[in-house]
Amino acid sequence: MSLAFSLKNNPGAYAVLVGAGISKPAVPTAWEVLTRLIVDVAALHGEQIAVDAAEEWWTTNMRAEPRYETVLEKIAPSQIERQRLLKQFFERDAAPAPDEDFAIAPPTIAHQAIARLVKLGAVKVIVTMNFDHLLEAAIRAEGIEPTVAVTEADIRGLAPLHTLDCCIIHLHGDYLYPESMLNTQAELHAYRPVVKNMLRQILVNYGLIVSGWSARYDPALREAIKVHYPLRFSMLWMEPIEPLSAEASQLVQLKNALLLRLTAQQGFGRIADAVESMQVSRARHPLTARSAAETAKRELSGRWTAIRLHDTLQAELADLHANSNFHLPDYNDRKVYEGYADLVSSTEEATKVTASLVAVLAYWGRSENDDWWLPHLERFAVPVRSGGLTALLELRMVAGSILFYSAGVSAVLKRRYGLLARILRTNRDNPLRYGRRQLLSEVLDPGGIYEGFEDSHHRHYLLTSHLLAEALSISGETLSDAWQEFEILRLATLAQPMLLFQRNAYNYNELEREINVSLEKYPDLGSTSVDPQLIIKKREQVNQRRLECLNSLAQTVPLTRQHLLARDSHGMDTWVCPVAQRLKDDLWLERDQHPTIIAGIGGDVENVPERWLGLSTAIQAVSHAVGRRGDSESWRWAPTLPDRIWLDTGKPAAE
């Protein structure tokens, strides 16, 4: 924790030094390469041996201790030959051949944790003795392009290290550059002057975090650390295997290093988690949302009322209400507003535990549990009553939106439509029109809350869906479909009261009915006495009027960039929303017995006495609105037009 504190408060003050152990099992370690090479040497001598017997075979036949450098030097005398030989260990398919003991894999969790530290700005300099590119891959996956130094020319051309976002120095070379590779005892005994100067600069100016390095085979590096690394810097050495090599033990003692018996995966993972937790501005609950959800589920599974869960939830809600982001000293302060993105991030972080508890209660709870949290939604939907910048006044609504969606999507997942109806009916006072109420489903739409965020809906979806996946152990297509169903019902119930919807719903259904009657009456135009062209023309006229009504209905849908999928159906309405179409079909099949109708979701529609038909019409309007937006977005990808588009990203959906 003290190291994490130093990294957080002194970003870039420590360099990471890693050896082969960090890349295991993604790529073979030096020992695995050594034993495999010995097996190949034995084969040249006409003997077939197992990998486990390689060390004994070499000792017996070569009368010397097998060392990586000496074995490699005998098999491949030149650097070019060594590069070609080693290439087989770093470039091949992920699946091992039947006679192989290891396979190449993506970056390990340790690589990913180091990449997180780079993204957090805690680490900028990485020295690796490995020939692989796994660190580069992990860091690029975080959206950062590292500066990589392999050759002497690379090192000479480096800008000052403190000016670089991330620098990876391959101290012993890269297998793609044979002239840079250091493998043998002679090569590892002393570095070239350019490399020595760079290494000295790092050791003098940076603390060290060491992992995956035995120190046994690298005399030049050991000597450089002994001579140049000052005692004023703390050194952290992570090594899970006991005992340390004699060489490593000597360095640990000489430099008074802190030795942690952790793997690279464990050590870097914990450090990254701790730094990230401390970097979240005013975050109250780093890394506790999952445990809170698990505790809530255990308490709800008991026979008696979960009193402790009730008290825990009330305490979390009270703390969230009291969050300093919702009680700023000055709502007109431009400096505060310039930090709006940080305020949003810290608000999101502070809401995670409460949202996880609400999700579990909405999913696993019973009706008597709903009143523990449902009344609080309104409080989080009201901006601060003060003058000032709207974005700052509405910060608590960011928390409210996360809670609202966590509850609504969880209710859909569990098919608790009675609870969903209550959520969709919850309202607040309209601050602009005295005596009027506004539905929370309208005011807590992410598109109207995250000021200045172009990706507000997608950001909101990623954060909240991740919370739900952890809290409920549900993810993938199931969670995405439930999210879309909640959005569709939310948008449909908002569209229904609109005057334009009320005026067009009846006409739309009458025109739809007229088309269906024609299709039933004349299923085969080739066997009717009536002129088929007249029937076709009549159908086209009716369908044109139907589409005009449907377009009017779609205008009542408050659609922005919700997480909804649009698909080209290649049918009469072309682009539609598949989840909305499925929900509409279910309503037509079950009608008054559909659970949404039984629960009372949806309102009355003028001249449409069947409530299920009124809701179905609103859902069709949502589907059409989504389809029109998807159709429009698809043209951005011309000339290759996709047939499925996510509205929140504007990108084609993967098959």
Image (cartoon, grey):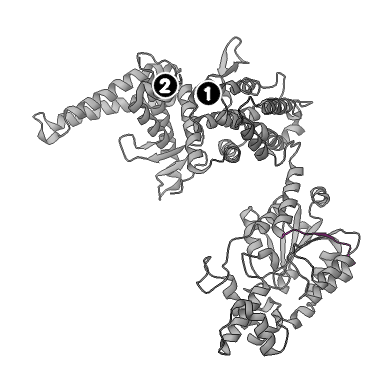
Q: Residues within 10 Å of mark 1 (few under 14, many from 20)?
A: many
**Residue at the extreme left:** 529
Q: Please, is residue 31 above or below residue 163 in the view?
A: below
The magenta segment = 254-263
Q: Residues within 10 Å of mark 2 (few under 14, many from 20)?
A: many
Q: Position of residue 489 (x, y in %)?
A: 47, 27
Q: How far apart are the alpha carbons under marks 2 and 1?
A: 13 Å
Which image quarter: residue 298?
A: top right
Q: Is residue 258 left or right of residue 352?
A: right
Q: Is residue 617 magenta?
A: no
Going by the numbered disc 1, the residue's amino acid type is Leu
Q: Which mark is residue 597?
A: 2
**Residue at the extreme front:** 303
Q: Is residue 194 left or right of residue 575?
A: right
Q: Is residue 121 visible?
A: no
Going by the numbered disc 2, the residue's amino acid type is Ile
Residue drawn 66% across the image and 65% down it? 23
Label 1: state its secondary structure.
helix
Q: Is residue 201 left or right of residue 505?
A: right
Residue drawn 67% across the image and 28% down it? 309
**Residue at the extreme top:** 435
Helix, strand or loop: magenta stretch? loop
Dot 2 or dot 1, earlier in sequence: 1
**Along the line of sight, the residue nearer the viewer: 484 or 527:** 484
Mark 1, residue position: 419
Q: Please, is residue 48 above or below residue 321 in the view?
A: below
**Along the line of sight, the residue nearer the viewer: 216 or 575:** 216
